[in-house]
């Protein structure tokens, strides 16, 4: 199985699929091609939330604002999974989330002399490598042509929230397609306050378990499916109602 | 085969696919993840139009404005198909459309003690159930864990049009991505009037078989691929030209 | 393998998939359902860029502003590929790009008496034909029911650029989802000018190999993954910055 993730929209991923299907008969599963454009932390967040639900697979990830520069291309092995991606940190949070106890994260670098277009490494570098890794097997990365153990690699860490007895201080990590603003504040910060009010950036909002417990159009603070505090509106957009976007600070006070 | 339908956009459906692929090797086919947000009648319409074209399958449907409330989750069996969905009526028009003569619609309720996130039952309830039904088989729903025969279930009916000798009175059911306003008025109401004019909400419009028989930008009234009267514009948006949206009344007069 | 391409958005392609899966167990791969609406040259461009990367397949293409008129429906055979499409030229550039040396392009016409909706031939004509061709095999098109050798067919040619010693004169073929304006001017026109400036429609712009070599928000002229000159903005939209859209003229002067 090969999963595909990118910020390419349509139709560029189809060329990647064609390349993969020329070289393998892997089942292909689209994770998303609608990641926020050239937003490496945003894509890293979604991959961390989604890839751990998959069975062992080769994950081909292309969110790559540095395409055509000298940024490296890597393959990250963790357990029975491999993630093929640019070396910009996008794969690391997902790799750590996939890792079971005792799993080590190993990183290989793609060293190829093949001519690649300067602008579409998804088709010319990452898709062929994903197919090659799939065919040889995640256990045998040392046998894959053009792959060598990396000396180092780019890390990526999400901003850390602070939680205190009077509230929490954090940031919006991403806004999903519904307009829910997903923060880095752990759900524990509000989990004994359902039914009560808190303040978000100074303004009061009710803490609720589910969207439908407030009227349509009303704001709420909830624990999202990722386990984090979310700023939402029932049948509306939380990012607009709370006036926040990805990266903005969120002060939660009891 | 498991089909997936939701209003989730991207990337939430990928987590559902991961969960399904952990538990089964079913072929997964996306019906749509772009259903109108939290619009149960709209989704029910599209499912009724699309699912009957599929061979026997497990259809996993998540358009669920009541997620996290005490609405039930159900599995609807009809013929060799099963539809896994929230108990809000979204599955019923499709089930009736799939039913052949003599097919009975049976409804089971999902009773699970598994912890689920309050907000993402697609991943935590519906996808695992779709995989379980697929693995055990639609004929053996009584053997699926956490599934019991339902005492009752929510129905959903589309508004009924009235057709008379002077025209028809109905409503817009949905607007498709092209901007065609699909009504509940049966195509028979105009099928002997191609080439003539009718009035829609008082304004004249030509009745045509195909979009291309009027100039680009011009309005027309036609019979859509669903067999219903559609308000359209050749290479444009019928909803804007006729100033109607989902739920609005449509008075057609000869 | 059957690939699907259309301008249908969602959920109409799902009905096509259902029809195909009733008649065959082909692997289905979506190329795109987001082609520019009813833009035959735009779709023809993307198909030419993407389909040659695929292994032998049946490609089902529906971009069909003439649906319901007397335009013919055809199957184009080239090598081990077949393209099922309306006879409006959309398939021809891709067929020529797929053709290896010595491959001949053969065109068959779909002659069916089956009732089809006037507006959804994707579901009623093209999908069933794609499944039939897949089941019988591209080598045996003469055995497919309702398929006869065509007397002729519609061609489609992209506008030809002119390249001189002082620059090049061409047009924008398509704008991709990133906002890159892809022209018909061959990359050779600028390939010895990286690092220099040229003028685009009179205004200076730097020629660069990659987006990331200019600051975010800055314009550049580059060679895209298709080998053509592209007008782009690093992390922005080239079409807006250069004020061009599909079909607009592009004068490049050194």
Image (cartoon, coloured by chain):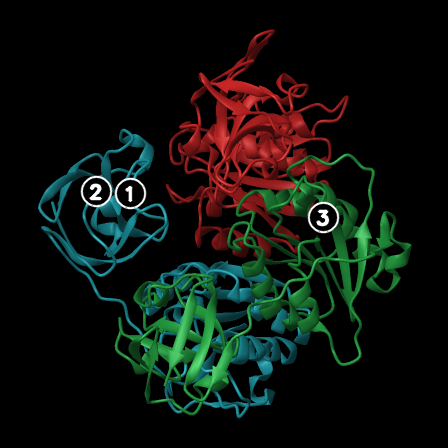
Chain colours: A cyan, B red, C green
**Mark closer to the observer (2, 3):** 3
The crowd level at tag 2 (other Cα within 10 Å; few <14, some 14-19, many 20+) is: some
From the image, tell me which residue sits under label 2: A241
Is residue A211 positioned above or below C54 on the image? above
Task: Give percent across and percent down for residue C140.
Answer: 88, 61
- Res C46 → quadrant: bottom right
SS at badge 3: helix
> CA separation, marks 2 and 3?
44 Å
Q: Are marks 1 and 3 in contact (CB under 8 Å)?
A: no
- Res C198 → quadrant: bottom left
Labelled disc at residue A237: 1
The crowd level at tag 1 (other Cα within 10 Å; few <14, some 14-19, many 20+) is: many
From the image, tell me which residue sits under label 3: C127
The crowd level at tag 3 (other Cα within 10 Å; few <14, some 14-19, many 20+) is: many
Residue drawn at 52 percent across, 54 percent down: C34
Q: Is residue C135 visible?
A: yes
- Res B138 → quadrant: top right
Q: Dot 3 falls on which chain?
A: C
Q: Is residue A224 left or right of residue A98?
A: left
Q: Nearer the viewer, residue C46 or A163?
A: C46
Task: Give percent across and percent down for residue B82.
Answer: 65, 36
């Amino acid at each position: 199985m090969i999963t595909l993730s990118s910020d390419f929209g349509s139709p560029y991923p189809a060329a990647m699929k064609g390349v993969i299907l020329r070289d393998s008969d892997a089942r292909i599963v689209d994770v998303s091609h609608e990641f926020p454009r050239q937003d490496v932390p945003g894509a890293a967040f979604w991959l961390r939330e989604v890839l751990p639900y998959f069975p062992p697979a080769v994950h081909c990830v292309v969110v790559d604002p540095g395409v055509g520069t000298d940024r490296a291309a890597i393959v990250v092995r963790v357990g029975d999974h491999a993630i093929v991606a640019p070396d910009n940190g996008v794969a690391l949070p997902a790799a750590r989330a996939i890792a079971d106890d005792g799993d080590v994260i190993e990183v290989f670098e793609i060293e190829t002399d093949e001519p690649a277009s300067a602008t579409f490494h998804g088709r010319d570098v990452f898709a062929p490598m994903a197919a090659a890794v799939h065919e040889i097997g995640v256990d045998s990365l040392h046998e894959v042509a053009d792959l060598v153990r990396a000396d180092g690699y780019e890390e990526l860490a999400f901003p850390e929230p602070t939680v205190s007895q009077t509230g929490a201080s954090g940031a919006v990590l991403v806004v999903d397609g519904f307009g829910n603003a997903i923060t880095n504040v752990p759900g524990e910060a509000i989990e004994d306050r359902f039914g009560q009010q808190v303040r978000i950036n100074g303004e009061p909002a009710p803490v609720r378990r589910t969207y439908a417990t407030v009227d349509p159009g009303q704001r709420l603070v909830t624990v999202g499916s990722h386990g984090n505090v979310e700023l939402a509106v029932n049948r509306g957009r939380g990012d607009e109602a709370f006036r926040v976007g990805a990266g903005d600070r969120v002060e939660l006070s009891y």
